[in-house]
Amino acid sequence: MLTLIKNASIVNEGKIFISDLLIEDERIKQISEKIDVNSDIEIDATGKYLFPGIIDDQVHFREPGLTHKANIYTESKAAIAGGITSYMEMPNTNPQTLTQELLEQKFKIAEEDSLANFTFFMGVSNNNLEEVLKTDPKTVGAIKIFMGSSTGDMLVDDRKVLEEIFSKTPMLIAVHCEDENIIQENIVKAKERFGEDVPISEHPNIRSEEACFKSSSFAVKLAKKHNSRLHVFHLSTEKEIELFDNTIPLSEKRITAEVCIHHLWFDESDYQEKGTLIKWNPSVKKKSDQEALFQALLDDKLDVIASDHAPHTLEEKKNTYFKSPSGGPLVQHALPAMLEFYKNGKITLEKVVEKMCHNPAICFQIEDRGFVKEGFFADLVLVDLEKSWEVTKENILYKCGWSPFEGQNFHSTITHTFVNGHIAYEYGSFDESKKGQRLKFNR
């Protein structure tokens, strides 16, 4: 099967250049200024931009056990529409992914249902170290530690367990960092002031800068002590930026960091309009935090942009502060949001591709993905930067049926998404005849 893309403006490795690109079956066969072949499919991409497929290193697709909110099929479909061709899914499902058997069960579901490429993280608790150490670095993205209260039973707060994991595992360790004791102290203070009716505007005071920094600085300290490979998820504060380095190449970093769309887009002033719809852990904080995170992204102290896609039903979200769960759906709108920042002159296309495509592939050592290169898998996204659209209930693809971006007008449109050379999405239509593949890792 030959697919020829003509006259695309390819964005790759810090450059933008007009070229043809030939796909043979699952992989990129040739990139050249002019390719003349008899192809099965030919696409004229004049005026459009061709990106590597987005790799989202943090999503929660809720399967198994929480499928009233989302499942692997529905959320991977939304991801494809958003230009995300590969995702890494978290272990806080039901049951939690704390054994190798449960981990493989999730892979089996994805092999049958996922429209995008996938990997799943092995979860860590205070008492599953033996199972964690069985994780295969070549076929599993990472292990995930919740050093905070986001997932209840998966909170790892045993210092001895953490020391053992950081000293013994060869795997990349991905961490959610918030200090539980500080959070609980802040909850007590909030209840003393407001009673049970705590307003959502208190969320950044409860899940505070101090709670984030204490936990993330501890994780970094452990990683340095044991020379562990650490990746810190969803930075939300200016203070945490000082923990990270931009003086060495990404491929040589032992400690890396991620920032999420919502911490770049929203700040605490948005709670008044959006309420619990933008309740995330860690919390959306001050405007100064938002601005500092964006600058740290541009300065390469923060390495990866992700979604932390974590859907809940609208009924669940539209609840009182303590009853409303944290998290929101984002995979369909993550790339359009970053392209809006490009339109506003805040970031270049080359930097968007670096942070959403190249760097996740480098950080996680993903095999043959994340770049527009001959021989690599043809995970690709075509974008029309001049075609506007509005986020409405009618075009939201998440199973939960809502988005914090409802009413937002985006000025760029994803027209095509290729997964392993297959046109999975084209102008709003899906071809589900081929499924995504399990990611492999060069470790």
Image (cartoon, rainbow, N blue to C red):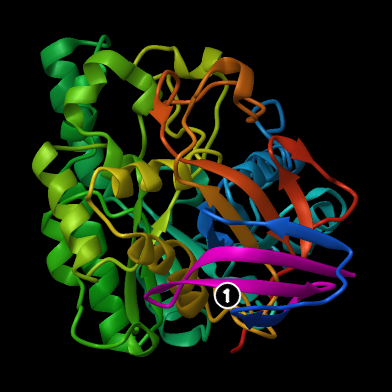
- From the top left corner, tell me how far across and down residue 214 is, in percent: 18, 58
Q: Relative to 254, does residue 93 appear above or below in the rendering?
A: above
Q: Which residue is mark 1?
A: 372
Left or right? Give the position of 129 relative to 288: right
- From the top left corner, tell me how far across and down residue 259 is, in percent: 33, 55
* Magenta-highlighted residues: 1-28
- From the top left corner, tell me how far across and down residue 305 is, in percent: 39, 57
User: Is residue 17 within the magenta segment?
Assistant: yes
Q: Quadrant of residue 175?
A: bottom left
Q: Indicate the quadrant containing the C terminus: top left, top right, bottom left or bottom right.
A: bottom right
Who is closer to the viewer here, 410 or 37?
37
Q: Relative to 120, does residue 92 appear above or below in the rendering?
A: above
Residue at 27% x, 86% y is 225
Amino acid type at image mark 1: Val
Left or right? Give the position of 165 relative to 31: left
Residue at 72% x, 38% y is 71
Q: Relative to 170, does residue 113 appear above or below in the rendering?
A: above
Looking at the magenta stretch, what is its main secondary structure?
strand
SS assignment at label 1: loop
Q: Indicate the quadrant containing the N terminus: top left, top right, bottom left or bottom right.
A: bottom right
Who is closer to the viewer here, 176 or 254?
254
